[in-house]
Image: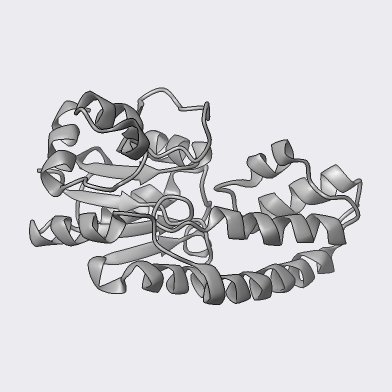
């Protein structure tokens, strides 16, 4: 059996990337120039500092030390507002988590989102499903560094190679691969870059005969499906 499963949050378990887009575009406009969709895509799965620096560089704005705290507070206040009104779990995710729990598989959240926002996202899915969580402000280096996944493996009492990861962002997939985990990618965009060693959820489901319209979702996925995939990754 898989020793533990690590779940990315934004874009993987909750449909929050559109909400992050709203707040990120607003921050880029405050700095003087709205991000292009291509530049916005480079912020997906990254930490706040990385996102701020991408926005500032695109706007030609030279960041001052105080900008990090000011923009952080503005962004996170906006995200709390958006989460309160619009955050929802991805279709099928609660049913899958409940089935995995019934089989005694330890589940952990691994998200670059900082703790002050992450807890509300976890609650939107169901805190009771998880044995623990690791957030971006609780490790020396957030994704794309492998620290978060190595820490989660420690919490699970397992080696990274005994653990499975579900991730939507390319940076998160790379982090999990570098940590030594096995990875199922849940890409949020068609044609998204998939690092070597990552298998896509869509491909796994299509090979099982899943209808095309459900192949990229968790609808109908069971614990036995996940265990079977794990054995062949």
| Above-or-below relation of 117 to 53 | below
x and y percentages locating residue 145 in the rendered image? 50, 43
In this rendering, the count of numbered labels is 0
Give whichever of 88, 105 is nearer the camera.
Answer: 88
The part of the image, by quadrant, that contains residue 2 is top left
Relative to 33, 42 lies left or right = left
Task: Determine if residue 180 is in view.
Answer: no
Q: Give the residue displayed 71% in from the left and 36% down from the top.
A: 38
Give whichever of 172, 189 is nearer the camera.
Answer: 189
| Above-or-below relation of 88 to 28 | below
Q: Give the residue displayed 47% in from the left and 58% down from the top.
A: 139
Give whichever of 65, 201 is nearer the camera.
Answer: 201
Q: Give the residue displayed 25% in from the left and 73% down from the top.
A: 128
Relative to 200, 115 lies left or right = right
Relative to 5, 19 lies left or right = right
Task: Determine if residue 141 is in view.
Answer: yes
Q: Give the residue displayed 83% in from the left and 44% down from the top.
A: 57
The part of the image, by quadrant, that contains residue 124 is bottom left
Question: What is the basis of the colouring in this image?
Answer: one colour
Q: Quadrant of the N terminus?
A: top left
Q: Quadrant of the C terminus?
A: top left
x and y percentages locating residue 208 in the rendered image? 19, 28
x and y percentages locating residue 80 in the rendered image? 59, 75
x and y percentages locating residue 51 in the rendered image? 69, 51
């Amino acid at each position: 059996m898989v020793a533990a499963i690590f779940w990315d949050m934004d874009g993987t378990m909750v449909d929050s990337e559109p909400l992050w887009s709203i707040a990120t575009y607003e921050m880029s406009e405050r700095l003087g120039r709205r991000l292009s969709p291509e530049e916005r895509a480079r912020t997906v799965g990254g930490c706040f500092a990385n996102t701020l620096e991408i926005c500032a560089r695109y706007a030609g704005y030279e960041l001052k030390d105080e900008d990090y705290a000011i923009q952080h507070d503005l962004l996170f206040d906006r995200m709390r507002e958006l989460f309160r009104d619009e955050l929802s779990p991805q279709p099928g995710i609660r049913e899958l988590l409940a089935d995995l729990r019934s089989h005694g598989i330890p589940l952990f959240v691994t998200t670059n989102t900082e703790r002050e926002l992450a807890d509300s996202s976890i609650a939107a899915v169901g805190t009771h499903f998880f044995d623990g969580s690791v957030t971006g402000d609780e490790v020396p280096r957030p994704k794309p560094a492998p620290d978060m996944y190595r820490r989660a493996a420690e919490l699970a009492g397992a080696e990274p190679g005994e653990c499975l990861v579900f991730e939507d962002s390319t940076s998160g997939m790379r982090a999990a691969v570098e940590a030594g985990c096995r990875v199922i990618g849940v890409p949020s965009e068609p044609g998204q870059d998939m690092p070597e060693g990552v298998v896509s959820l869509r491909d796994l489901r299509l090979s099982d005969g899943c209808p095309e319209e459900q192949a990229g979702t968790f609808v109908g996925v069971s614990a036995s499906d996940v265990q079977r995939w794990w054995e062949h990754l």
